[in-house]
Image: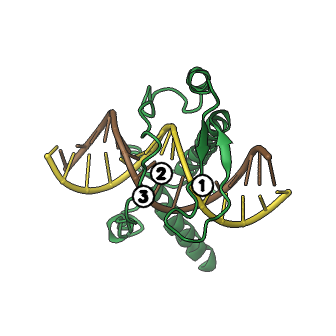
Chain colours: A green, B yellow, C brown
DNA sequence: TAGGCCATCTGGTCCT
DNA sequence: AGGACCAGATGGCCTA
């Protein structure tokens, strides 16, 4: 079917993305008192996000001297203490790498979905939330077409 | 400059 | 025990 592509867009389908509330309900800010915020988190955004393992590995090697450990905070402030999972710095770094890879594959899926939903070529790149919402509307639109044929 | 978006880190929970 | 998944926090970049 030739419908995939640039024939319809949000305006054609009477989609007003702005009608969806974009405000997320923000929980009270979690207290981060024993871990520095990510000072290296914004390096070289033009790199593939998980190609930085070598650099992180250096940092890991530096920090891992003396085997410091991360402690899950668990039920901090509660009287009923949960079992805390203790991980090493190396394990924490490995988990960070896995998380980066996971987010990378998630973004790949978003990119693929962006290519499937119809937009005008000159439209700016859809955000992730816009992509999801437009995909929902697009699917509904196509289902309506099928039912009418 | 404020707000939106995103990448990353981190800890909690679930599952194998 | 450890990996996957998730959500909160944080900070940088970009645009109106």
User: Which residue is painted at 62% across and 79% down in the image?
Assistant: A147
Quick check: marks 2 and 3 in contact, CB under 8 Å?
no
Q: Which mark is residue A6?
A: 2
User: Which residue is painted at 55% across and 55% down in the image?
Assistant: A73
Quick check: marks 3 and 1 in contact, CB under 8 Å?
no
Q: Position of residue A100 (x, y in %)?
A: 59, 39
User: Which residue is painted at 39% across and 64% down in the image?
Assistant: A12
Q: CA distance from mark 2 to mark 3?
A: 43 Å
Q: Secondary structure at mark 1?
A: loop
* Quadrant of the rendered image containing residue A56: top right
Q: Position of residue A113 (x, y in %)?
A: 57, 52
Viewer-closest of A81 and A110: A81
Does A2 sit above or below residue A62? Answer: below
Please identify, in this view, whether the residue under mark 1 or under mark 2 is nearer the observer. 2
Decide: few, some or many residues near mark 2? Use Cα within 10 Å; few <14, some 14-19, many ≥20. few
Q: Which mark is residue A2?
A: 1
Q: Quadrant of the C terminus of chain A?
A: bottom right
Q: Secondary structure at mark 3?
A: loop
Please identify, in this view, whether the residue under mark 2 or under mark 3 is nearer the observer. 3
User: Which residue is painted at 59% across and 48% down in the image?
Assistant: A71
Q: Secondary structure at mark 2?
A: loop
> Chain for mark 1?
A
Does A27 sit above or below residue A116? Answer: below
Decide: few, some or many residues near mark 3? Use Cα within 10 Å; few <14, some 14-19, many ≥20. few
Q: Position of residue A1 (x, y in %)?
A: 64, 57
Q: Which mark is residue A30?
A: 3
Viewer-closest of A6 and A88: A88
């Amino acid at each position: 079917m030739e419908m995939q592509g640039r024939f319809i867009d949000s305006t054609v389908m009477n989609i007003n993305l702005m009608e969806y509330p974009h405000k997320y309900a923000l929980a009270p800010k979690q207290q981060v008192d024993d871990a520095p915020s990510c000072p290296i988190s914004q390096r070289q955004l033009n790199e593939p996000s998980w190609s930085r393992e070598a650099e992180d590995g250096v940092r890991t090697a530096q920090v891992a001297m003396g085997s410091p450990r991360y402690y899950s905070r668990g039920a901090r402030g509660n009287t009923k203490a949960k079992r805390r999972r203790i991980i090493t710095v190396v394990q924490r770094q490995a988990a960070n790498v896995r998380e980066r890879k996971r987010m990378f594959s998630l973004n790949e899926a978003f990119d693929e979905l962006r290519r499937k939903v119809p937009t005008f070529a000159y439209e700016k790149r859809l955000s992730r939330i816009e992509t999801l919402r437009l995909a929902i509307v697009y699917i509904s639109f196509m289902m309506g077409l099928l039912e009418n044929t």
